[in-house]
Image (cartoon, rainbow, N blue to C red):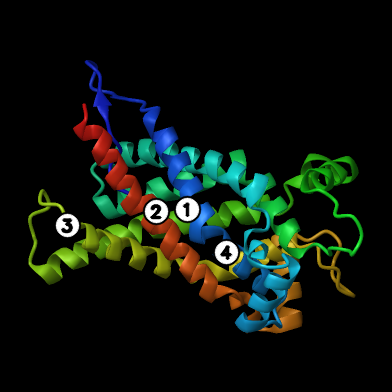
Amino acid sequence: MGAMTATVGPDGKKKLQPINLAIGAGLNIFEVSTLGQPFEVLKTHMAANRGDTMGQALVKTWRRGKGPLGFYQGLIPWAWLEAATKGAVLMFAASEIEHVARKAGLGPAWAGVLGGMGGGITQAYTTMGFCTFMKTVEVTRHKSAGPPQSSIAIARDIFRREGIRGINKGVNAVAVRQCTNWGSRFGLSRVAETGIRKFTGNDDSTKPLSPYQRILASAIGGGMSCWNQPIEVIRVEMQSQIKSAGRPEKLTIGSAAKWIYQQNGLKGFYRGVVPRIGLGVWQTVCMVFGGDQVKAYFAARK
């Protein structure tokens, strides 16, 4: 992620930019409402049902939703609510951290890594725990043939039975995932931009890359950031509503990892990685390339 639209006050301190909250929320809602949620549903299904192939995941998802709406399970209200809040928090927190890191003398790549890590951790603990849990519940819960129970009713029931811990189950795994996700995405995107500059002979850092080159850099950063798929599978297992014989009732990161290994071996930690790569590419193009473009637009209007 490039530097945010910045205004510097007379004391030399960068003023906070509320517009970054709106930009982050808007871009995340666009991302999840287009390709984001179908990729999310598929990778969650495969991480929870680790014996299913991609083809089986597609068929079962279609059947669960009685058509294409199956690929948008959990979109309303949870994915929209999560997107609006986490996008704003990410864009805002990462902006401030990256700005401080650059002032301290760090280069674009390391500043981007720190900004992404800090933004990812912040969004996990402030907004994502509950929403991510409920999205996973929607994809993994058993749906009976009777009258459907609303998603809100399920959340209310979980809160009544297990309290705030229950509806934030797996939040520590979410924090680890988001920290490594966005630290990798922002940092690797900047590394990719540097590589593209060298390959094309554009060594002038003041001369911007073309839109196509920046999209390519974002896609590379998003795809390569999926190295942390094991923690994503652990997160899904901790939040899954699928009941299995012998499965520990209250999972921690450690006990979930042990259970996955016992059931599926090392390959179990990489189930759903293909749709997650697609999700990572799309999210990073939207939030890194899209964020840079929108912020540049507003900066030019000043």
Say which label, 4 or 3, has the lower sequence index.
4
Q: CA distance from mark 4 to mark 3?
A: 30 Å
Q: CA distance from mark 3 to mark 2?
A: 17 Å
At which x and y percent is residue 82? 59, 44
Q: CA distance from mark 4 to mark 2?
A: 16 Å
At which x and y percent is residue 126? 60, 38
Q: Residue, x 55% and y 39% (percent of image)?
A: 85
Label 4 residue SS: helix
Say which label, 1 or 3, has the lower sequence index.
1
Q: Is residue 81 visible?
A: yes
Tag on residue 31?
A: 1
> Which amino acid, by three-letter code, is at mark 3?
Leu
Label 2 residue SS: helix
Mark 4 and mark 2 in contact? Answer it, CB < 8 Å.
Answer: no
Tag on residue 209?
A: 3
Say which label, 4 or 2, has the lower sequence index.
4
Q: CA distance from mark 1 to mark 4?
A: 11 Å
> Which amino acid, by three-letter code, is at mark 4?
Pro
At which x and y percent is residue 220? 34, 68
> Which amino acid, by three-letter code, is at mark 1?
Glu
Query: Residue 45 falls in which quadrant of the image?
Result: bottom right
Say which label, 3 or 2, has the lower sequence index.
3
Q: Please tell me whether mark 4 or mark 3 is closer to you in this view.
A: 4
Tag on residue 38?
A: 4
Label 1 residue SS: helix
Query: Residue 210 falls in which quadrant of the image?
Result: bottom left
Q: Please tell me whether mark 1 or mark 3 is closer to you in this view.
A: 1
Tag on residue 286?
A: 2
